[in-house]
Image (cartoon, grey):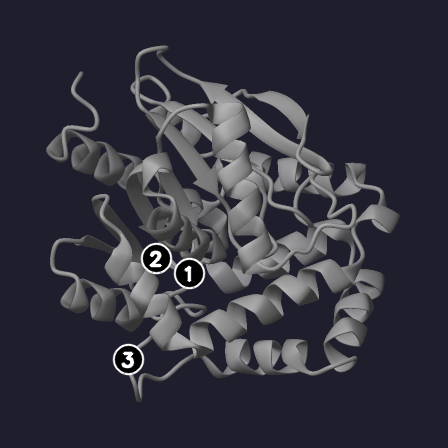
Amino acid sequence: MPELAEAASRTVDLDGRTHYLDFGGPSNAPVLVAVHGLGGAAWNWLALAPLLRDEVRLIALDLAGHGLSPAAGRPTTVGANQRLLGRFLDEVVGEPAVLVGNSMGGMISVLHAAAAPEHVVGAVLVDPALPRPMLSRGDPRVALQFAVTVLPLIGEAAAMRRRRSLSIEDQIRRGLELCTVDLTRVPDSVIAEGVRVFSERDSGEFPPTDLVSAARSVVRRVANASRLQRAMAAVRAPVLVVHGDKDRLVPVAAARHAARRFPAWRLEVAENVGHVPMLEVPDWTAATILDWLRDKEILTTG
């Protein structure tokens, strides 16, 4: 298991405090901007970063309502966080980048690659939240959780109850247990960093309603498959899809469905891996990304 990367923790004002981790990298290397999933944060990339940053520049963003970026009056929907990503690329990154998006972050990366192709030289979609084929079966536990979340008032009450009844570490571990096949593969130091970040937050700045709003937005986007598929079809940058075959949140069938519809997209499936391969199998994930970057001549050194 690799050591965790050190990173510069920075904030910028994008109509509200916006936090990101800059992992550094060679000055002339391509820039990768990592976009986490629902309930995640920039620390989700800590195990992957040291395996990439010798060859690329890596920056991980906290979306509004996540990590250390309070919503501060900003919406936390998919569309609003896509616009935040666009501003971040314009005002902080300052050059076209490869978007590396997990789950909701993968959806946001697709939408932004379609809407602002000038920002995007490639997209790595890690277990992205994309439409699944008809009649595909999902995990009953996940389906129940999302069903509760989307119900008016009930979703907010359930989120508040979880926050009050569980310690921060238990909340993180339960989330990761759902996202992994084997939680022991995730370094304890990553979990400790997640606990530190959540402990540092002012709870008044991060009400559960922000996360519920984001979750409902993801559900609506997936349910409106035609709109999301139009965005997928509009992406002109090269795309790599990386997906765990035991993902309970987004079945691998969704990735295979996307690869059939868009044969130019490259699909790589990790065996016996869940929703967050960058945490569960970072070595495999890094090697797969670097190989694809070289194949597409985005990375020309090494």
Q: CA distance from mark 2 to mark 1?
A: 6 Å
Q: Quadrant of residue 283?
A: top left
Give the secondary structure at mark 3.
loop
Given contact means CB atoms under 8 Å apart, are the residues at marks 2 and 1 in contact?
yes
Q: Is residue 1 visible?
A: no
Q: CA distance from mark 1 to mark 3?
A: 23 Å
The type of residue carrying mark 1 is Val
Residue 202 percent across, percent down from the top left = 85, 42
Residue 158: give x, y in percent of width and height. 76, 74
Q: Residues within 10 Å of mark 3 (few under 14, many from 20)?
A: some
Q: Residue at 44% across / 44% down in the picture?
A: 279
Which three-letter amino acid code belongs to the residue tagged 2? Val
Category of crowding for the residue at label 2, using alpha-carbon neighbours closer than 10 angstroms: few (below 14), some (14–19), many (at least 20): many
Label 2: which secondary element: loop
Asked if residue 259 can be seen in this view, the reply is yes
Q: Label 3 to label 2, Cα distance in Å?
A: 21 Å
Q: Position of residue 166 (x, y in %)?
A: 78, 61
Residue at numbered disc 2: 273
Q: With 67 as the anchor, is 105 left or right in this view?
A: left
Numbered mark located on residue 181 in the image? 1
Pointer 1: residues within 10 angstroms few (<14), some, or many (20+)? many
The residue wearing badge 3 is 133
Q: Between 227 and 273, which is closer to the camera in this rendering?
A: 227
Residue 40: x %, y % from top left = 58, 50
- Which residue is outermost to the right? 204
- Is 144 rendered above or below residue 49? below
Residue in the picture at 81% in, 70% down: 161
- State the SS at label 1: loop
Q: Residue at x 31, y 23 (%)?
A: 30
- The amino acid on which the numbered mark 3 sits, given as a three-letter code, is Pro
